Amino acid sequence: MDNVIILGIESSCDDTSAAVIKDGVLLSSVVASQAVHEAYGGVVPELASRAHQQNIVPVVHEALKRAGVTKEQLSAVAFTRGPGLMGSLLVGVSFAKGFARSLGIPMIDVNHLQGHVLAHFIKEKEDDANQPKFPFLCLLVSGGNSQIILVKSYKDMEVLGQTIDDAAGEAIDKCSKVMGLGYPGGPIIDRLARQGNPKAFTFSKPHISGYDYSFSGLKTSFLYSLRDWLKDDPDFIEHHKEDLAASLEATIVEILMDKLRKVAKDTKIKEVAVAGGVSANNGLRNAFREHAERYGWNIYIPKFGYTTDNAAMIAITGYFKFLDKDFCSIDKPAYSRVGL
Ligand code: KG4
């Protein structure tokens, strides 16, 4: 099927985003991030919903304009239906439904997590060919999730392991907050870690059987160690922030890669992708490259723009669902929690 033009809309957390994809090729992607949360050290749901309300119309308008597409040319509107913050989701979901209905075109609901995985299939040019082959493994690591997913096809995904408590990004953000660094902590820790010694400090690693993760123990170990060190030197953080960041990052990357390696070995799958906000982390990206060399993995690391929340991944998922005529009815509500 040709000339399929999908508008994607994403508003599950604190980024308002719209993107246009034509026959699988990205025409435009616009993301409005919300700086309002920085002062609070985390996303404030009520403020996020209000900012989405302000941003949604200009963001969609800009995405269509940059794509050079009129709304009448759209084939369907795809939107993130969940999981995410309910107030934030409602803005995108309601807008998408109203927009699609007014144009008389199908609406397509997208699971945000599935979107992160399928971000690997966004083509920036028609001949983009570097895409994972099925079946592949995807390590999905963000502020809300840490999962190892077996991706059998565009629509058939199985979670093989996941965190039983905090997500990796959440742990990084919380440790960064304890150190008095800004929010979100991920990019700050990443930057500091590049100048530090990853072996300077040791933090406890979880002992969880199977393929599941746990990050709450690491967070507590980080907090208690820091508290002890600060007793002897009140400026400990200032003196050691690069080494602290590097050691924290190295521990998290090791925890993530240990389980992923185990799954890859057991399933004998060598196509391995990474997705989600934490996949922007340079330490994790390097670990993927090392594993590719050592274990012969074919790795798929997303461009930075597709690591954090974006509507391009919603539009590409919508595109595949459109080809399957997998549409959604107007009465489908947003959902805050659900797996894949
Ligand atoms: O996927 P995402 O944008 O949002 C959701 O969780 O929905 O992921 C955000 C997470 C935050 O925890 C943030 O600190 C983390 O991704 N993150 C990073 C980096 N950039 C963002 N973590 C480590 N290194 C980074 N460079």
Image (tube, helix red, strand yellow):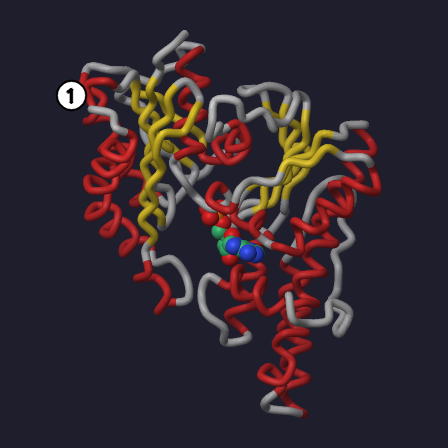
Mark 1 neighbour density, 10 Å: few (under 14) some (14–19) many (20 or more): few
Indicate whether 226 appears above or below 103.
Answer: below
User: Toward which corner of the image does residue 224 lie, by quadrant?
Assistant: bottom right
Residue at the spot 70% in from the left edge and 67% down from the top edge = 247
Q: Amino acid at mark 1?
A: Ser
| In this picture, residue 121 sits left or right of residue 272 | left
User: Toward which corner of the image does residue 300 lie, by quadrant?
Assistant: top right
Q: Which is nearer the eye, 105 or 332?
A: 105
Indicate whether 87 appears above or below 191.
Answer: above
Which residue is under mark 1?
A: 102
- Kindly tell me whether mark 1's CB lies below 8 Å from ligand 1: no
Q: Which is nearer the eye, 16 or 129?
A: 129
Kindly give the residue lying farthest to the top in the view shown: 1
Residue at the spot 77% in from the left edge and 47% down from the top edge = 290
Indicate whether 338 appears above or below 53.
Answer: above
Q: Quadrant of the N terminus?
A: top left
Q: Specify whether residue 199 is in view.
A: yes
Q: Which is nearer the eye, 147 or 304?
A: 304
Residue 252 position within the rendered picture, expressed as x and y whole percent measured from the top left? 68, 57
| In this picture, residue 262 sits left or right of residue 256 | right
Q: Specify whether residue 166 is in view.
A: no
Callout 1: SS: helix
Residue at the spot 76% in from the left edge and 35% down from the top edge = 297
Residue at the spot 64% in from the left edge and 66% down from the top edge = 194
User: Across the whole image, how many numbered discs are drawn on residues?
Assistant: 1
Residue 51 position within the rendered picture, expressed as x and y whole percent measured from the top left? 25, 52
| In this picture, residue 208 sits left or right of residue 4 | right
Residue 199 position within the rendered picture, expressed as x and y whole percent measured from the top left? 77, 69
Residue 243 position within the rendered picture, expressed as x and y whole percent measured from the top left? 68, 74
